[in-house]
Amino acid sequence: MSRIWISKGTTLYHATLTKNVKNIKKMGLVPFQPTLWVDAYGRRQGQGQVFVFEQKLDAIGWAGHIGWEFFKKTATDDGKVSVLSIRSPRGDQWEVDTADPALQLSSTGLLLKRYETVPPSRITAVKKIYLKDMRAFVASDKSKKKPKGRLIEVEDEPEPEIVGMPKYPDTGFYMPKKAGEYVLWNVEDDEPVRRYCDTCEDDRVVEVHVWPMESSGYFNEAELCSACGAEI
Ligand SMILES: [Zn+2]
């Protein structure tokens, strides 16, 4: 996946149901919420990440899509869908979403995602989307919109199923602020940590599963046997 590093504070945009806004203002944009992310065929998209658009125009277009999906009409005419402005400070990191190539191609800017919570303090504006906004969206010349050049691509790497999670001998575990499944890695020996599994009755590679705690910035972890999934 391609990672984006915000070089200078900028604003990103998130479309959601207006009824969710109150909770988002309290909790922020939290990963692993029921997703609004549905592609052209009605399939739920993503794996629980937070999604934002680089361009407000794309968020408005997506608001229309959500309105259609949830209310089976352009429900945006009565403000049932809102677009949130998200302040993204310098150094903030996102990944470019490529799950829906058709959407990426029809967008003027990038579609970004991540597992990290966007705290409520970063929500700078909430705009209910009405029919006039959708009309403006449809009539707009999307080719004139250019990315702002504040998003710098820092890396291009294949997305691994499971990546190494380093274990430092002195400091205990290095905990990535990212949900996922990791192999516990012994940095000194440069190999996976193995531990005796009572269930398998053998030495097994240790997997660390990391997931965010409900409505907080902290993460839970569990160490599991890579063969049988039992705690190890
Ligand atoms: Zn086992």
Image: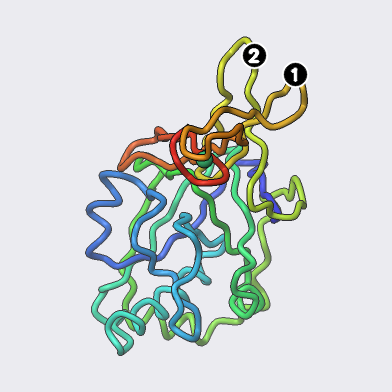
Provide the residue designation for mark 1.
188
Spatial CA span between label 2 and label 1: 8 Å
The residue depicted at 42 percent of the width and 86 percent of the height is 135
Q: In which quarter of the image is the N terminus?
A: bottom right
Which comes sooner in the sequence, label 2 or label 1?
Answer: 2
**Residue drawn 30% across the image and 89% down it:** 73
Q: Name the residue under label 2.
A: 169
Left or right? Give the position of 111 relative to 191. left
Whether pointer 2 and pointer 1 mark residues with C-beta atoms closer than 8 Å, the reply is yes
Q: Where is residue 68 in the image (x, y as percent from the top left)?
A: 35, 84
In the figure, 84 relative to 78: above or below?
above
x and y percentages locating residue 143 in the rendered image: 67, 78
Residue 55 versus residue 210 in the image, above or below: below
- Applied colour scheme: rainbow
Q: Residue 140's quadrant in the figure?
A: bottom right
Give percent across and percent down for residue 194: 63, 29
3 w.r.t. 103: above or below: above
Q: Is mark 2 within 8 Å of ligand 1?
A: no
Q: How many marks?
A: 2
Q: Is mark 2 on a helix, strand or loop?
A: loop
Which of the pair 45/151 is nearer the observer?
A: 45
